[in-house]
Amino acid sequence: MDKTTYRKKIWKNIFGLLPAKQKLRFLWILLILVVSAVLSQLTPLAVGYLTDHVLASQDVSFASVLPVLLLILLVNVANEIIKVARRLIVEDTATQAEKTARQRAAASLLKAPLSYFRGNMTGNIHGRLNRSLEGTVKLIKLLFMDFAPAVTTGLAAVVTIFLRLPLPVAALVILVIPVGTFLVFRQISTQKGIRVELMETRADMDGTMVELLGGIETIRTLDSAQAEEDRILGRSEQLRRKEMRHHKAMAFYDCLKFINEAVFSVLVIGLSVLLASHKVISIGTVLTAYLCFTQLTGPLRELHRILDEFSECVVLANDYFRLLELPTDFSYLPDASTDTARTAMQNTAERTAQSAASTQTGFVQPPQNPAGISTASNDPLNHKAMRNVYAQQAAPAANDIRIRKVCFAYPEKQDQPILSDINLEIPSGAFLGIAGPSGCGKSTLIKVIDKLEQAQGEVLLGGQALSALSRAALAENIALVPQTPFLIADTIYNNICYGMKRVVSPEEVKEAAQKANIAADIERFPGKYDFPIAEGGANLSGGQRQRIALARIFLRRPRILILDEATSALDNTSEKLIQSEIEKLKEECGTTVLSIAHRLSTLKNCDEIIVMDKGRIVQKGKYDELEATPGIFRDMALGILK
C-alpha cells in the first residue's frame, strides 16, 4: 500500500469515529481558517498604510492615527475570537472522537482471543492503547489547529507579498520557503523513526513496571528491589542516550533553520531599504514586507514539529486501528454449521480482508480463529449480523454435559497437547469432582466446557453443541468461580452483583452473602455493603475475596456451576458451610456442579470423581473407592503426590 493510500485509509477511519453532525463541523473549521488567514494580513497592510499615509503627513494628530490603530486592534481581537471558536469546534470534535475510539478499543480488547493476552504484556497493551488513542486524537488537532492554519496563513501571506511588493523583493521573501523546507525534510529524514523507537522503548518500560508492581510482595520477600531498581536504571539510561542523540540533532537543525531565517530577514530588510531609498517602494512597504516575511517564517519554523508529530501520530493511529481489527474470540462467533452464520461470517471475512492494514504494527497479532475470520470490532454490519445469528440460538434445554474425543493444545504450542482424547458424561444435577496433579489439564478442561478455549472434539450442553451457544446463553447458564477471583474497584454490593443482567434487591444480595459466609465480615466493614474494595481486592484477605466471588453464584443460581479451587483460601469451617449451601443449591435448582480441588476432602460428597494425569482421565469413581485403589488419587490423599 503506497503512502497516499495508507494515509487516506487512516483519515477515513478517523472520520469514521465521528457522527455525521461532527463531520459537518469540518466545513465550519475550513471557513474559519480562510477568514482567519485573510484577517491576519490586514495588520501588515494597516501598518504600511499608517506609515505611508498618516505618519508621512506634516501635521500628524493622534485623532488621525486612532482609526487605524482601532482597526488593527479590532482585526486582531476578531481574529482571536474566531480562533477560539475554531479551537472549541476542534476540541469538541476531538473529544467526541476520543470517546468513540476508547469505547471501540474496549470492545475490541474485551472480545479478543485469549492468545493475544498470552502474547503481550498487560502493561505494554495498556501503554500502547493510551499512546495510540492519544495519537489518533492528536491527528485531528494537528491538522486543524497547527498544520491547516499554518498553510492558510502562509498562502495568504504569499498572495499579499506578490500583490504589494515589487517582484525582486517578493521573490527574495518567497525564497526562504524552499530553503527552509529543504532543511525541514533533511531533518525529518535523519530523524526518521526515532520518535516511534522512543515510543516503543517507553511502552516496553511501561510493561515492565506494571509487571513489577503486580509482583510487589514477591519482590519484597526476596529483597530484589535494588536489583529491579538497577535494571530499570540501566534501561532508563539507554533511553536517555537515545533521547539525547535525538535532541542534539534537533538542536543542530533548529540552529540551521534560525540562521536561514536570519540571513533572509537581513536580505529582505536590506533590499527593501535600498529600494525605498531610491523611491521604488515606500517606507510603509518596507514594514509590510518584513511583517509578511515573519508570517512566512513562523509557520515554516514550526513545520518540522508539525510534520514530525504528524508522522508519529499516523503510526500511532495505525496501531490503534490495527487494535480494532483484532480477531473476535471464537466464543463470540456464531456456529459455522448454520447457513445464517456462514453468510454472516463470510461477509465479515470479506469486509475485513478489504480493510486489512499492511503496515507494520507494534501489536502482536494472535492466530486467526479456525474459520479464518478476523472480525473488526468497529464494523456495525458485523455486529448486526452477529446479533441476528445469536438471536436465533436457543439456550441449552438441560444441564447435562457430554464430552467426546476432546483434544486441546494452545495455538502457540500445537506440539504440546494439554488434553488428549477426553470422553466424559455428566448427568444433569450431578456433582463431579476433578482431581489430579498440577499441570494435568484440570483447569483447561473446565475452560473448554465454558467455551474459553477452543478444542477439537465435541462438547454438548443439554444435548446442544457448545459451538452453537452464544456467550450470552452460556453466561445465563454457567457460572465459573476461579481460584483467584476477579474483583473490581467498587463497593462490595456492586461486586456481588457483578454480571447480573437484572435489577437485584438488597435483600437478595444479603442472602447471597450469608450463604457465602461473608455477611458477618461485611457488617464489620465501614459502610458495610458500600465498603469500597481496592483494585483486585487488595484490602481484603484471600478468603474474603473468594467468598465474595462465591456470593455471586448464590445470587445467580446457575444451571451449571464450575469451581476451580474456589475454596482454597478458606478455613475448614467456612468451607464446610459453603459446601453445604452449594449442595442445597444443587438440590433446589438441579444445578450440575464441577469442582476442581487439591484439598481432596472437598470432594468427599461428589457423585463421581475423575482423576486426570498428563491431559487424560486415568481414574474414575467415588471418593472411598479411589482412596482404596492404588493410583494417583490415593497418592494424593496420602500426601505422596501434589
Image: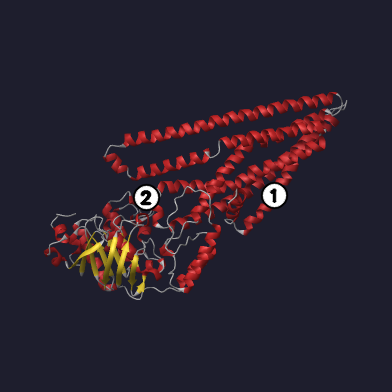
Task: Give the colouring mode of the picture.
Answer: secondary structure
Is residue 444 found left or right of 122 in the rendered image? Answer: left
Q: Residue furthest front?
A: 415
Q: Give the residue type that dot 2 points to.
A: Glu
Is residue 133 found left or right of 125 in the rendered image? Answer: right
Label 1 – label 2 distance at C-alpha:
46 Å
Q: Quadrant of residue 42?
A: top right
Question: How many circles with numbers are drawn on the protein?
Answer: 2
Q: Quadrant of residue 12?
A: bottom right
Percent position of residue 641, x then y: 17, 55
Is residue 98 found left or right of 77 in the rendered image? Answer: left
Seen from the viewer's position, the closer of residues 358 and 142 is: 358
Is residue 223 found left or right of 5 in the rendered image? Answer: left
Label 1 close to label 2 by CB (< 8 Å): no
Residue found at x 28% / y 70%: 592
Q: Which mark is residue 30?
A: 1
Q: Please give the residue where the numbered disc 2 appears in the rendered image.
A: 535
Q: Quadrant of residue 479?
A: bottom left
Percent position of residue 6, x then y: 59, 51
Mark 1 is surrounded, within 10 Å at the Cα level, by few (under 14), some (14 to 19) or many (20 or more) other residues, namely some
Mark 2 secondary-structure assignment: helix
Q: Quadrant of the C terminus?
A: bottom left
Residue found at x 66% / y 27%: 259
Q: Residue furthest right?
A: 58
Q: Give the residue type that dot 1 points to.
A: Leu
